[in-house]
Image (cartoon, coloured by chain):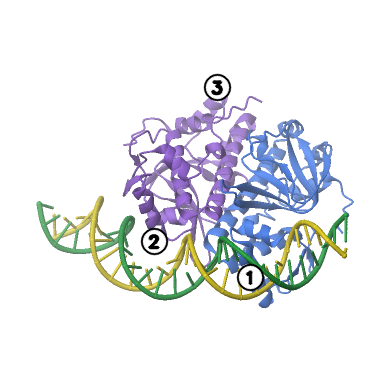
Chain colours: A blue, B purple, C yellow, D green
Amino acid sequence: MNASPISPNTLMIRKLESSYSLGDEEKQALQQLPVQIKSIKPGADIVRIGDRPTRCCLILEGFTCVYKVTSEGNRQILALHVPGDMPDLQSLHLMVLDMSIASVSSCKVGFIQHDDIRRICERYPRLTATLWRETLIHASILREWTLNNGQREAYTRIAHLLCELVFRLKAVGLADGGPIHLPITQSELADATGMSSVHMNRVLQALRANGLIKSKRAELVVPDWEKLQEAGEFDPLYLHMEESDAS
Amino acid sequence: MNASPISPNTLMIRKLESSYSLGDEEKQALQQLPVQIKSIKPGADIVRIGDRPTRCCLILEGFTCVYKVTSEGNRQILALHVPGDMPDLQSLHLMVLDMSIASVSSCKVGFIQHDDIRRICERYPRLTATLWRETLIHASILREWTLNNGQREAYTRIAHLLCELVFRLKAVGLADGGPIHLPITQSELADATGMSSVHMNRVLQALRANGLIKSKRAELVVPDWEKLQEAGEFDPLYLHMEESDAS
DNA sequence: CGTTTCATTGAATAACTTCAAAGCTAGTGG
DNA sequence: CCACTAGCTTTGAAGTTATTCAATGAAACG
């Protein structure tokens, strides 16, 4: 289905380039980064809170999530990542991980050594800026999530989350008008939006009843994007795509 | 009360140094950054969503918050900042602001031109790392907030938030064992934790009844830190203080 | 074909919100 | 110095949203 013939490095470059222009030298440097590829089963931890990583990960196929758990055992999903994302760039500068990352679907992940990244960042400051920017965009997305979870009622909240996912998948070519492969359970969506899975189920039914989505298992269809966007109060500004920074 | 005789630059350096070692050259460069100081009334916007800032701000006195508002007009506070914090470093790399920043109390803010920061970052890559790190810590704090708001019940949630505020104020010398000057209204605490101000009021009363806090107006006393910490399930790992990165 | 995981349903309960009013406190201007 | 005002806190009662528990149904996997 996503039998992508492109290399991990090319995927990364395309993603970074999609919101920030890169020079030829930088691209070549990225192209030569060693990437260690690993396949991961659904629901497995990739890195854990408390770890002191010596490498960053790059999502190649499938979905992953960032999460934390309270002492009562309640899980909050803090981010969902799609192919091209680098979820733990922060470990370049924060020694101890303050969150865990797990696979949501079965997926392929590439690992890049911190040392390798640091080396090319020293040489190409523009690359530093690009990676910094990537972490800033993740922070912006989390701000929107926090607004969403804290201030919007369940119906709007879920519509918003679905809008974001579809939008981001479109950006990496994993969604067009047709059915979207979205292997995320209702329970996981519930953990991401801070609600119970029972309520998630009921609200999804309401969205379906209103014709905003069609969904079964791991497949999502959005018959009317405008309508869903409106229901979710979705404004993609916070994703910071298509900004050109010529400074 | 906080008649701090130290300069804005020194405050910034101390804050950055408190979690990351800086060389003499870097410190000197920071020391020479031009800072434009401005006094701001309570409840005033400092920068607004949609702006394209050409400078960053540095909190010198008082409290500020980052917030976003839904189209229904509900406000979510996404961060609270204390003196020494730089809330919008992100604007160095994201052209359009995706959030607003407002004063919570009356406060003093320093403004530093992007160009000036970029100049010294180019020259001292270690400084780039330090500022990047600062933005990453803010992101980590937001993750904890999102976990807190999404998964913990009101009582625990508020205890947690209060723990964090006290902890961060201690770190910049604005809290010792005694009464803490905390000019934040219950309504603002409610907006930060995603609950109604009425409920916030009732839960604060419960915390007081249990002897975890004493509070009136803009003053907070924590009679038993251990107890409050336990009630809030507070573990300061996510604040990433006292990490030494000698790499 | 059995097992597991995920989705769906109903009913009872709990947590929290909303609305509306009243009480406090600090600051303001006479 | 006092009365007034504005903003913040507190209270009660009713209503809503969402949770929990427990069970059933449906699809995927080996």
**Which residue is tagged 1?**
A202
The amino acid sitting under disc 3 is: Asp
Mark 1 Cα-neighbour bin, 10 Å: few <14, some 14–19, many ≥20: few
**Which residue is tagged 2?**
B198
x and y percent of residue A201 in the render? 65, 67
**Which residue is tagged 3?**
B24
Give the chain letter at badge 2. B
Q: Do marks 3 and 1 both belong to one polypeptide chain?
A: no
Circle nearer the viewer, 2 or 1: 1
x and y percent of residue B24 in the render? 55, 22
**Up/down of A8 relative to B4, above or below:** below
| Image quadrant where one finds the N terminus of chain A | bottom right
The amino acid sitting under disc 1 is: Arg
Which element carries disc 1, helix, strand or loop?
Answer: helix
Give the chain letter at badge 3. B
x and y percent of residue A46 in the render? 73, 43
| Image quadrant where one finds the C terminus of chain A | top right
Q: Quadrant of residue B59?
A: top left
Nearest the eye: B231 or A26: B231
x and y percent of residue B4 in the render? 36, 33
